[in-house]
Image (cartoon, rainbow, N blue to C red):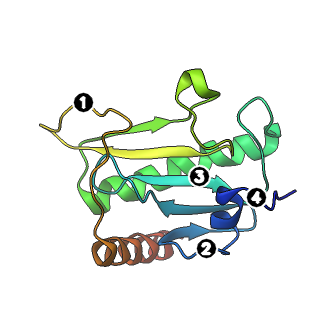
């Protein structure tokens, strides 16, 4: 099910242009437009689920496996020294968009602690280049 007024439903289903790193029948992986580090991406289901309390277990399992796949490729391609995989549920936990999604946040030695709300500016052209880099790496990985 999709919700017509949900921005993440629109992003996941291609109604709003994105820098897509990966797409299948269930998910779209895109760069976050307000990244907290270089390469910060989101895994977004194409169907609407408010959060982890709402998502079907099979879809959740696929999302976690996709996170692992993406992190492995992104670590190599962006030379990340580590990764945060974050999924917020409800306002008290920092959820600001009420459509289940997983943050994939590359970490680099010497970077500062990440605080949501303190995002960095993103360069649209650089994001496009980086998205192609990841898509190409995923294609050669299969």
Q: Residue at x 56, y 44 (%)?
A: 102
Q: Position of residue 116 (x, y in %)?
A: 38, 36
Q: Which residue is mark 2?
A: 16
The reply to whether the C-beta atoms of the residues labelled 4 and 3 are less than 8 Å apart is: no
Q: CA distance from mark 1 to mark 2?
A: 31 Å
Assess disc 4: are there few (<14), some (14-19) or many (≥20) residues with their C-alpha within 10 Å of its C-alpha: few
Quadrant hosting residue 134:
bottom left
Q: Which residue is mark 1?
A: 113
- Give the structural element (helix, strand or loop) at label 4: loop
Q: Residue at x 30, y 63 (%)?
A: 122
Q: Is residue 61 left or right of residue 41?
A: right
Q: CA distance from mark 4 to mark 1?
A: 33 Å
With respect to residue 99, does 28 lie above or below? below
- Give the structural element (helix, strand or loop) at label 1: loop
Mark nearer the viewer, 2 or 3 = 2
Q: CA distance from mark 1 to mark 3?
A: 25 Å
Mark nearer the viewer, 2 or 4 = 4
Q: Where the N terminus falls, by quadrant?
A: bottom right
Which mark is first along the chain, 3 or 4? 4
Q: Position of residue 76 (x, y in %)?
A: 30, 58
Which mark is first along the chain, 2 or 1? 2
Q: Which residue is mark 3?
A: 66
Mark nearer the viewer, 1 or 3 = 1
Quadrant hosting residue 58:
top right
Mark nearer the viewer, 4 or 3 = 4
């Amino acid at each position: 099910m999709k919700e017509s007024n949900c921005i993440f439903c629109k992003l996941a289903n291609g109604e709003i242009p994105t820098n897509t790193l990966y797409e299948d029948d269930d998910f779209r992986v895109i760069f976050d437009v307000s990244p907290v580090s270089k390469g910060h991406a989101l895994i977004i289901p194409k169907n609407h689920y408010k959060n982890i309390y709402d998502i079907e277990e099979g879809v959740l399992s696929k999302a976690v496996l996709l996170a692992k796949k993406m992190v492995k490729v992104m670590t190599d391609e962006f030379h990340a020294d580590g990764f945060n995989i974050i999924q917020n549920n409800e306002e008290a936990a920092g959820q600001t968009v009420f459509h289940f999604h997983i943050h994939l946040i590359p970490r680099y030695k010497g970077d500062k602690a990440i605080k949501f709300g303190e995002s960095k500016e993103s360069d649209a052209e650089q994001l496009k280049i980086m998205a192609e880099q990841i898509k190409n790496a995923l294609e050669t990985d299969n």
